[in-house]
Image (tube, grey):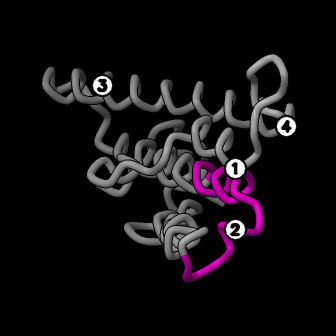
Amino acid sequence: MIGAMGEVAQPPKLGQFASQSIGLDAGGTLDDPVLRADIARFEIDEVAFRLLLERSGDLARQGKVHPAFSSVLKYYGAELNKRRYELLMAAGGSATLEWEGERSHDGEVAREWLRAKANSIEGGTSEVQLNVISKRILGLPGA
């Protein structure tokens, strides 16, 4: 499922990746407070998404899930996945921009960053998903 954020291949953990790339301060926390806050926000949103997936599964088993709810999962998952790789790119600095070489693990993060952008296009763009959500779930009028 596009919205499940690539469950098969797990990307590097943000905090671990950032601490290896940027380093830790004297207190043992990530040395970049802005990136640290961005990672914390992402991790909270990631937990919320996992709970949303679990809840939607429960509703589906009960036959109570809204037919258009898959658009919510697709949108949320694709956008969250883009944010993950944007944070990995920010944490890795210029090394993550290299397409080949040992320092960038042969461009693994850069390639996945580009691939994450495709998640918001394939299976219906994020804009289309938002339109479906607004009309079918929220009942808003069309433009």
Most common secondary structure along the magenta stretch: helix
The answer to whether residue 57 is left or right of residue 10 is: left
Q: CA distance from mark 2 to mark 3?
A: 36 Å
**Disc 4 designates what residue?**
32
Q: Secondary structure at mark 4?
A: loop
Q: Decide which of tag 2 and tag 3 comes sooner along the chain.
A: 3
Category of crowding for the residue at label 4, using alpha-carbon neighbours closer than 10 angstroms: few (below 14), some (14–19), many (at least 20): some
Residue at (40%, 23%) from the top-left corner? 51
* Circle 1: residue type: Ser
Q: Secondary structure at mark 2?
A: helix
- The percent position of residue 8, horizontal first and vertical second, equals 26, 52
Nearest-to-viewer mark from 4 and 1: 1
* Circle 2: residue type: Ala
Q: CA distance from mark 3 to mark 4?
A: 33 Å
Question: CB of mark 2 within 8 Å of CB of mark 3?
Answer: no
Question: CB of mark 2 within 8 Å of CB of mark 1?
Answer: yes
Classify 108 as above or below 100: above
Check residue 54 in the rendering and tell me which mark sits there, or answer none. 3
Q: Decide which of tag 4 and tag 1 comes sooner along the chain.
A: 1
Residue at (34%, 31%) from the top-left corner? 53
* Circle 4: residue type: Asp
- The percent position of residue 20, horizontal first and vertical second, equals 65, 44
Q: Secondary structure at mark 1?
A: helix
Q: Nearer the viewer, residue 60 or 16?
A: 16
**Disc 1 designates what residue?**
21
Q: Decide which of tag 2 and tag 4 comes sooner along the chain.
A: 4
Nearest-to-viewer mark from 3 and 4: 4
User: Is 45 included in the stretch rendered in magenta?
Assistant: no
Judged from this view, the residue extending furthest toward the bottom is: 100
